[in-house]
Image (tube, rainbow, N blue to C red):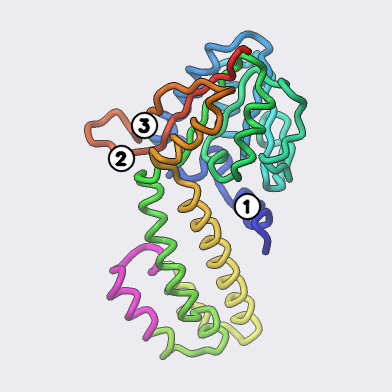
Amino acid sequence: MSTREHWTSYWEATDTKAACLPSPESPAALVMDARWADLAASLPEGAKVVDLACGMGAAGKAMLSAAPHLDMTGVDYAEIANPDEVGFPVQGGVDLEDLPLDDAAVDCAVSQYGFEYAGEAATGELVRILKPGAPCRLLVHHRGSAVVRVNFVRASILASLIARRVDGLVEEHNPAGLQTVFDHMIETYGEHPLVLEIATVCRDSLRLPDDKRAEVSQRLGAGMRRERALLDALADAAMDEGDIAALKAATSGEMTWEEPRVLHASEEENAPILCWELDGQRKAS
């Protein structure tokens, strides 16, 4: 399965508002929505805004809720199965390194948990599509965020289960082999929800007829590998101060950037890190 197919499957199965967040109504989602509302309020009526790597449109929806007068569009690398659910025009199958937009086409560009996954050429494309003086706001994964830390553990668990062929053990109807695997997983990770979830699927599948058990095995193996690929991409995409400095250096002749801001999951003291907020503006000349 290709990277685009992995992301397409991801959006087909994910909450339509805020993937990577526990729920759309969570304090973390409200923090991000507030930052989009703040930006939307600063833009003139009819401003053309593009939501880069929009997924199901979390950023664009939040901006339109605050400022319905904006002319919002979105692009995403994945093929969006139900684009009508996004709430504004979306084009799927778009690489951020080759945007189908004219030079100086937009008054603002935004991205929530998306831009950082693209290659270096996406930075040049971001600059190219912005009108002189136009702003951009990128909410990108922070290498030290709770999302990245939690998913690092999930990736480790999946890697271990894939290496130990749990899907093959299911198809072979090998309860002893599965017991050995999950004894090791519990010893290593404790009663982690993902370990218990997959253990339950494996246990229940042993009661099925051979053909049905083979189907479960195939779905389990494909699902684990798909999620592992996306989690590996997250680990690679998450940014630290050095990555941000490199972005600023690469665009220093064409963009001005504010100091990066760390957003937290709530206003509570010691709230976990949520993401970076990167605010930039294309130079007027």
Badge 3 amino acid: Val
**Image quadrant for the N terminus?**
bottom right
**Is 68 left or right of 267, judged from the image as shown?**
right
Q: What residue lies at 48% left-to-right and 37% top-to-bottom?
A: 246
* Distance from the alpha carbon under mark 1 to that under mark 2: 26 Å
The residue under label 2 is 272
Q: Are marks 3 and 1 in contact (CB under 8 Å)?
A: no
Q: Are marks 1 and 2 in contact (CB under 8 Å)?
A: no
Q: What residue lies at 47% left-to-right and 77% top-to-bottom?
A: 163
Badge 1 amino acid: Trp
Ranked by sequence position, the earlier of labels 2 and 3 is: 3
**Is 135 left or right of 273, judged from the image as shown?**
right
Badge 2 amino acid: Pro
The residue under label 3 is 262
Ranked by sequence position, the earlier of labels 1 and 2 is: 1
Is 280 colored magenta in this rendering? no
- Expressed as whole percent of the image width and height from the top left, the position of residue 212 reads 63, 80
- Total numbered labels: 3
Q: Which residues are magenta?
A: 180-195
Q: Nearer the viewer, residue 271 or 13?
A: 271
Q: Residues within 10 Å of mark 2 (few under 14, many from 20)?
A: some
Establish if 229 lies above or below 144.
Answer: below
Ranked by sequence position, the earlier of labels 3 and 1 is: 1
Which quadrant would residue 239 be assigned to in this image?
top left
Which of label 3 and label 1 is nearer to you?
A: 3
Q: What residue lies at 56% left-to-right and 33% top-to-bottom?
A: 111
Is 193 colored magenta in this rendering? yes
- Expressed as whole percent of the image width and height from the top left, the position of residue 253 reads 57, 23
Establish if 198 lies above or below 75.
Answer: below
